[in-house]
Amino acid sequence: MKKFLQIFVLVALATLVFKPLVASGQFFFMEDENIGKPMQDFTLKTLNGGEISLTEAREGRRALVFFWATWCPHCREALTQIMANRSEIDNKGIRVVLVDVGEKAEAVGRYFERNKISLDVMLDESTEVSALFGIVGVPTFYFLNEEGVVVNVLHGYPEDLEAAFKKS
């Protein structure tokens, strides 16, 4: 009985430790399982008070879907890079879709106001959408082609944006 209990505890621990890694596929040694598949559509409230779906936000264009949070220093740095490159991104026909993970609209609104961010943001307050895609950490970037197919997933803003859209 003691041996059975030891084995059971080891299996339970291994499941808890490794199952999120396998499910998320978001580590450098594993390819995300969403690559090559259309990104499932979702609808969230926005900071401006409305609701929008991913399909509406993309407008049939390539999209950079950025899962982030205001408390994340790497996310703040990536958002600064996006804002600095905004005209280049727009000129390339790429839609930036921000998805804030797990924060209230008031906190996100204050951050946007303080930092003069002019993009709208979708609010995943309950983290249901993030869980749907197996997001285990932010920042996470999904790169979608014109058809909405995930062509790449990265955990930092790429040095070469075009190259990030070409991986498939």
Image (cartoon, rainbow, N blue to C red):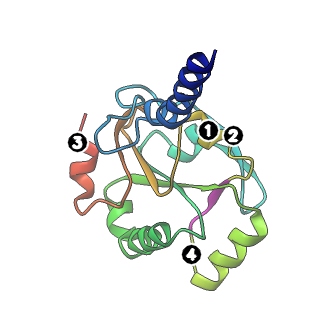
| Magenta run includes residue 91 | no
Residue 128: which disc? 2
Q: Secondary structure at mark 2?
A: helix
Disc 4 crowd rating (10 Å Cα; few below 14, some 14-19, many 20+) is: some
Q: CA distance from mark 1 to mark 4?
A: 26 Å
Q: For the magenta stretch, what is the residue range? A: 119-123
Q: Secondary structure at mark 4?
A: loop
Q: Which residue is mark 3?
A: 166
- Quadrant of image for the N terminus: top right
Q: Which residue is mark 4?
A: 117
Q: Residue at x 24, y 63 (%)?
A: 159
Disc 1 crowd rating (10 Å Cα; few below 14, some 14-19, many 20+) is: few
Disc 2 crowd rating (10 Å Cα; few below 14, some 14-19, many 20+) is: few
Q: CA distance from mark 2 to mark 4?
A: 25 Å
**Vertical relation: 40 (above or below) 153:** above
For residue 84, which quarter of the picture?
A: bottom left
Is the stretch drawn in magenta largely helix, strand or loop?
strand
Q: Residue at x 73, y 71 (%)?
A: 107
Callout 4, which amino acid? Ile
Q: Which residue is mark 1?
A: 131
